[in-house]
Amino acid sequence: TSEKSDTDIRFVCRGTFVHSTAEEALQILEDALLGVDSEGKIAFIGEGKELQKLSENFGFSPSAVTQLQQHEFFMPGMIDTHIHASQYSYAGTALDMPLLQWLNTYTFPVESHFQDLEFAKKVYTQVVKRTLRNGTTTACYFATIHTDASLLLGQIANDFGQRALVGKVCMDRNDAVKYYRETSEESQEETYRFIKELLNKKYPLVKPVVTPRFAPSCTEALLAKLGEIAKNNKLHIQSHISENLEEVELVKELFPNSESYTDIYHKCNLLTDKTILAHGCHLSDEELVLFRKTGAALSHCPNSNISLCSGVLNVRNVLNHKVKLGLGTDMAGGYSPSILDAVRRALDSSKVLTIQDPEHKTLSFEEVFRLATLGGSQALSLDERTGNFKVGKDFDALRVNVAAPGGPIDVIQNEKPQSLNSHMRLSSSTCSLAGDDRNIVEVFVAGKKVVPFSEP
Ligand code: GUN
Ligand code: FE
């Protein structure tokens, strides 16, 4: 067993690690040892008592191991599967209208400003910094219809070290705000240019995603073309689906020959195992079956669903249909850019369903923790590389301090010291239910410390 590994170890940490696996929604590894190699991948994860053996096998010095504090733990970086980077400037305002009116009144006029690259740079820099600080190690972004500003978002994510999927938004139909739309040809050509130029940059953690805004803002011809582009280049796809009832009715009018909202995307080759569609509050069970068959995933955006009075997604039913599901902030439809907020709203939404129907099996904290990490990773088809602390995956992680000044654990500790075990159970809840970004001490993406920031 003393076989020597030729992996170069960059650093080793010792302490409590909390993550999800397929079998266990919340696995707590106490006094664990985790090594990260020179490529930022997890080289080993073992027990503290194996220190001597591991240090010999992997060739690192036991004295160089970083020891976590008693009130700290590592968890996987969180994954925001749906966020509009272009809507940050008005996050927390303008939630007084239902979806379609909200888009016409606030969203489209604001997004039209992103032809101004100075403005885009300012907003996108703030978004990337804010989400990273809040523990979003992977973000799946909508930008706007503007190719150059969308490329800039990719560059900024790369510069700050955030893993990102970035979409240039496509829309060749917009009767309400005519100055914010493209022709079908423009939309196709600019999508090609966006993909080509972003891939040419060879950013290691940033990928393009084909992004028809949603069926009502695209002609069927454009949807079909985008499906073809995604298929020929094996790209990710993102859009919206069945968010609100007025939208579902509009889609029936605009696509009279389709069996369902899901059927439209399916016919245009837009449902693949690299597709993620936001909301899905009003999908039928038949539509969920189509998701399951094609491997397409849903992004659950509970803050937005409540803020715009769109609906309440029955996550339990989605999970029972074995459809992949992650969490999304959907900022600015959701007022918070924090994925911890999405964790809380997901629990609240599930409890609302239980209030309405006591038979409904409420989501547990552990299940929602998994949705924010491993679930999101699976939904974005990134689970070969991210989502939990499996050997061979990239080290995307948050160092969490449960005893941040003024937090509940700080109060408890000062009253009466707790044993580590119950402590960690509490602490994992603290991080998302009573904590905030002040509890997130450090953020790592692919083994690189990206928070606190080193300004690019
Ligand atoms: N549907 C189409 N566009 C949007 C958007 O920007 N936000 C939300 N919440 N739903 C949409
Ligand atoms: Fe959205």
Image (cartoon, rainbow, N blue to C red):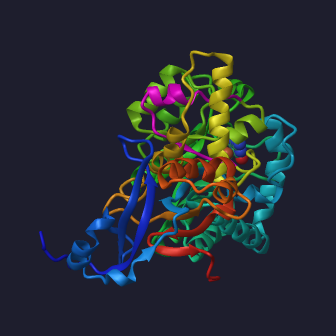
Residue in the picture at 71% in, 41% down: 303
Q: Is residue 242 above or below residue 401?
A: above
Q: Nearer the viewer, residue 267 or 137?
A: 137
The segment highlighted magenta reads 311-330
Q: Quadrant of ligand 2?
A: top right
**Is 397 on the left-hand or right-hand side of 329?**
left
Residue 335 in picture, x, y percent from top left: 77, 48
Q: Nearer the viewer, residue 326 or 142?
A: 326
Residue in the picture at 54% in, 23% down: 361
**Is 115 on the left-hand or right-hand side of 82?**
right
Q: Is residue 420 above or below residue 204?
A: above
Residue 193 in picture, x, y percent from top left: 55, 65
Residue in the picture at 35% in, 56% down: 384
Q: Nearer the viewer, residue 287 or 138?
A: 138
Quadrant where the image shows the C terminus: bottom right
Residue 290 inside the magenta-drawn segment: no
Judge whether residue 132 can be spotted in this image: yes
| Displayed quadrant of residue 32 | bottom left
Q: Is residue 352 above or below residue 13?
A: above
Residue 315 inside the magenta-drawn segment: yes
| Displayed quadrant of residue 114 | bottom right
Judge whether residue 217 can be spotted in this image: no
**Is 202 on the left-hand or right-hand side of 280?**
left
Residue 18 in picture, x, y percent from top left: 46, 54
